[in-house]
Amino acid sequence: MSTTEITTVTALPSADNSKKRKLKAILAGGLVLGIGAAVTLAAWNDSEFVNGAFGSGHFKMMGSKDGVIPFENYDTSGAANALSFSDGFNNLSRDEVVAAPYVVHLDADSTYSGEVTVESAAGSTGTDELRYGIIEVPSVAGCSTAALPTPENTVVPANTKFNTDPGEGSFTLDKPVQGNPGANVYLCVLVSATSNLPQDTTATATWKLVAKSNS
C-alpha cells in the first residue's frame, strides 16, 4: 500500500501584501512625525513689560522775624534775616538783657516733618562779653526779656558763649497738612551782657539753624 505525503506549502507574500506593510510602516512613521509636530506647536510663549517712575520728596524750612513779614528761606549767611531785638540792643549796659522773636515752619510742599538744631552762633570780637540763649514761646508776643527758660522750652541754654558748641537742644517742625505750611514754631533769642561789658563796643552775631527731615 503506498502512502501519499502531503506537504503544506507556505505561500510567498504577494506583492500586494508587501505594499500594504510598507504603507502601514509609512503611515506609522507619519503618525510619529505628526505627534512630534503637535508637541512643538504647543510650546506657547508670551511676554509682560512693567516700568516705574520715581521722584524725591521736598523739604524746606522758612523763617520770618515776626510771623507777619512773609516767610522766606534764608539759607546762606550772606542773606541772613536780621532779628528785631527789643529796645536797648544798640545801647547795652552791664547785665542788661534784650530779646528777639523768630518764627519758623516748613513750607506747604514739604513731604516730611523735621527736627531743628542750632548748629552755631558765630560772633564778632565784641561778643566776648555777651551771652545768649534760645527758648520756644507760645507766640511772638510771648518773646520778651521776661520770658523764662524751662527744661521743656529750652533749645540753647541761657548764658551760652558765642563761638562755642550750642549743645544738642532741638525742636520739631510739623509736616504740612492739606496744602498749608507746617505749624509755626516761635523762638525767642535772649542776649545778655556780662558784668564785664566794656563801653563803646559793637558786635555782630549770626545764628545757624539746621533742619533735618524725619524721612
Image (cartoon, helix red, strand yellow):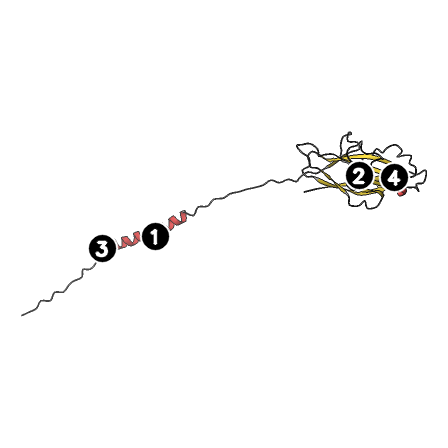
Residue 61 x %, y %: 74, 37
Report the residue marked by disc 1: 32
Q: Earlier in the sequence, mark 2 or mark 3?
A: 3
Using a 10 Å C-alpha cutoff, classify the residue at mark 3 as few (fewer than 14 neighbours), some (14 to 19) or many (20 or more). few
Report the residue marked by disc 2: 135
What amino acid type should be assigned to the residue bearing mark 1? Val
Q: Earlier in the sequence, mark 1 or mark 4?
A: 1
| Figure quadrant of residue 153 | top right
Q: Which residue extends farthest top?
A: 68
Secondary structure under the numbered disc 4 in the rendered image = strand
| Figure quadrant of residue 3 | bottom left
Residue 165 x %, y %: 81, 46
Q: Which residue extends farthest right?
A: 199
Marks 3,4: beta carbons within 8 A = no
Q: Which of 109 and 1 is in front in this view?
A: 109
Q: Which of 107 and 11 is in front in this view?
A: 107
Using a 10 Å C-alpha cutoff, classify the residue at mark 2 as few (fewer than 14 neighbours), some (14 to 19) or many (20 or more). many
Q: What is the CA distance from the residue labelled 2 to the residue labelled 4?
A: 14 Å
Residue 17 x %, y %: 22, 55
Report the residue marked by disc 4: 192
Q: Which of 35 and 74 is in front in this view?
A: 74
Q: Earlier in the sequence, mark 2 or mark 4?
A: 2
Q: What is the CA distance from the residue labelled 2 to the residue labelled 3?
A: 114 Å
| Figure quadrant of residue 13 | bottom left
Of labels 2 and 3, the one closer to you? 2
Q: Which of marks 3 and 1 is nearer the N terminus?
A: 3
Q: Earlier in the sequence, mark 3 or mark 4?
A: 3
Secondary structure under the numbered disc 3 in the rendered image = helix
Report the residue marked by disc 3: 17
